[in-house]
Amino acid sequence: MSRDQDIQLEKDRARYGLLAVVVSNLAITAVAAFGVWRLNGNESVIIGVLTAAFTAVSSTTTAYLGIKAVSNTAKSMAAAASATPPAPTPATPAQRTP
């Protein structure tokens, strides 16, 4: 694969990963809203539903952002390691004879 293809592949992964997170967050929000609507004012259960929905949304979003950050860091470290030439080994000094 060429470098342009690698860059395009990374863009596609980021785009579709973000799309998956947004769609799942919207689905969780829709289900929570439907659940709250159907509970007819039962406050203790509504609080439980909203807490679970908030936890699911924040966990999904945090997981995506964390994985993306680690992936970007690893990619930049690998690029820096391949671009840096190896350090020259120091020459051993000649031994002096008495």
Image (cartoon, rainbow, N blue to C red):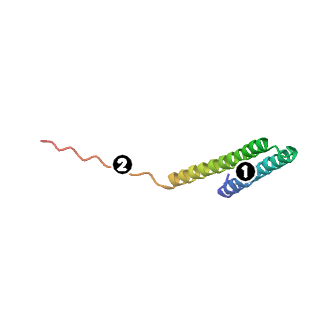
The residue under label 2 is which amino acid type? Answer: Thr
Q: Is residue 80 left or right of residue 54?
A: left
Q: Find numbered disc 2 in the image and state the secondary structure of the residue it sits on.
A: loop
| Horizontal and vertical percent position of residue 53 | 75, 45
Whichever of callouts 2 and 1 sits on the residue coming sooner in the sequence is 1
Q: Which residue is mark 2?
A: 89
Q: Which residue is mark 1?
A: 17
The residue under label 1 is which amino acid type? Answer: Gly
Q: Is residue 83 left or right of residue 23?
A: left
At label 2, counting other C-alpha atoms closer than 10 Å, the crowd grade (few under 14, some 14-19, many 20 or more) is few
Q: Nearer the viewer, residue 30 or 68?
A: 30
| Horizontal and vertical percent position of residue 4 | 68, 58
Please, which residue is most extreme toward the bottom here?
4
| Horizontal and vertical percent position of residue 94 | 23, 46
At label 1, counting other C-alpha atoms closer than 10 Å, the crowd grade (few under 14, some 14-19, many 20 or more) is some
Q: Are marks 2 and 1 in contact (CB under 8 Å)?
A: no
Residue sitting at 21 percent across and 43 percent down? 95
From the image, state whether disc 2 or disc 1 is nearer to you: 1
Q: Is residue 75 left or right of residue 57?
A: left
Q: Which of the image's four quarters has the C terminus?
A: top left
Distance from the alpha carbon under mark 2 to that under mark 1: 44 Å
Q: Nearer the viewer, residue 25 or 44?
A: 44
Q: Find numbered disc 1 in the image and state the secondary structure of the residue it sits on.
A: helix
